[in-house]
Image: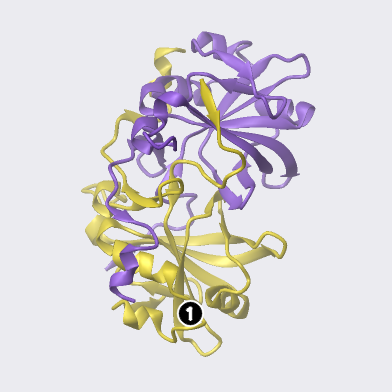
Chain colours: A yellow, B purple
Amino acid sequence: MRKNFGSKPALYPMPVLIVAAYDENGKANAMTAAWGGIVDTKLLGICLSASHKTTQNIFATGAYTVSMATVSTMVEADYLGITSGNKVADKLEKAGLHTSKSEFVNAPIIEEFPMTLECKLISYDESTGYMIGEIVNISADESILSENGSIDPAKLNPITFDPINHAYLPLGPAVGTAYQAGKKIQ
Amino acid sequence: MRKNFGSKPALYPMPVLIVAAYDENGKANAMTAAWGGIVDTKLLGICLSASHKTTQNIFATGAYTVSMATVSTMVEADYLGITSGNKVADKLEKAGLHTSKSEFVNAPIIEEFPMTLECKLISYDESTGYMIGEIVNISADESILSENGSIDPAKLNPITFDPINHAYLPLGPAVGTAYQAGKKIQ
């Protein structure tokens, strides 16, 4: 038997994304978002209401970065989500976070988040707040790379958002190989 | 030090979504997709190339379901992703999967996947293949509900897609409470 829950914005997994941008004076701000995902080969989509300070900053600069929240930065990531940049002048400083400028776009990389998508604004849908950006570069701190030099999700240790129970869930170790597991049936 | 990887369609976590639809004769088919996420309060976005049998079916009926792949259905989910419905006439039967019609939209629910978003087609972007659907209902099998009747991700046990290493990663137990953890800094 199935139970019906009506219309809800919920699936598993959902990301915990830290969106960061400079304002017109080069001051960095950031916020947390869970509604987003890959749209196409080079495109990322995120829902960001126009009222957010970060959204206004992106409109001003045309660029932003999107980082993964991790188990070790969960408190900071949650703080960036529950505090408005319109009310607190320097959220990043209060959270003890440090930024440097992306090599690729006019946007801040928050050093404490070890994996970052560097994006250029492509489009914004006023009715939904859905922002599409081009992923110009992905950068990752050397501390989260495997021996072969690629990103190791076990070292990144990202958190995910549980939209039903409002919890943060980590990822576990691999249970199978994509594009291979199904060959048993083929 | 950070390492640059260039432009890639990658973040953590990414979902493993099973998209199912009927063709014009009421025959069900399904495919697997990892590029997608919540777009707005009632909207889900997924990238589906127009050439897929499932995409053509959605164009025919205007409806589809999106289910979470789980650890116990990983082989079936991967099979649905590596096999084309244009080449194999009955992927669902070959995978041993069973369908019933959604109460809310003209689309099949695959019984073996315990959490399903039932969607109506809203828009399709020909250039990117990005499909937006309205989430009309979420249904969940009683076997994955907690004692209070809500969806329990530990019972659902969904898999996620690792876009860098092409692995399937499960979710772990909660490490924190959303909208609460950051109050330490506030």
Query: Where is residue A94, by image quadrant?
Result: bottom left
Which element is circle 1 on? Answer: loop
x, y (%) of residue B5? Answer: 40, 57
Residue at x 37%, y 22% (from the top left corner):
B72
Name the one closer to the observer, B65 or A122.
B65
Residue at x 35%, y 63% (from the top left corner):
B180
The quarter of the picture where the C terminus of chain B appears is bottom left
Residue A180 in sight in this render: no
Q: Residue furthest bottom?
A: A25
x, y (%) of residue A168? Answer: 34, 52
- Chain of the residue that carries numbered disc 1 in the rendered image: A
Q: Residues within 10 Å of mark 1 (few under 14, many from 20)?
A: some
Q: Is residue B128 toward the left or the right of residue B170 in the image?
A: right
x, y (%) of residue B168? Answer: 36, 34
Number of callouts: 1
Residue at x 65%, y 63% (from the top left corner):
A129
Residue at x 33%, y 48% (from the top left corner):
A169
Query: Where is residue A73, by image quadrant?
Result: bottom left
Kind of residue sitting beneath label 1: Gly
x, y (%) of residue A29? Answer: 45, 78
Name the one closer to the observer, B185 or B13.
B185
**Dot 1 corresponds to which residue?**
A85
Residue B148 in sight in this render: yes
Q: Is residue B130 toward the left or the right of residue B4 in the image?
A: right
The quarter of the picture where the N terminus of chain B appears is bottom left
Residue A60 higher or lower than B75, as above or below: below
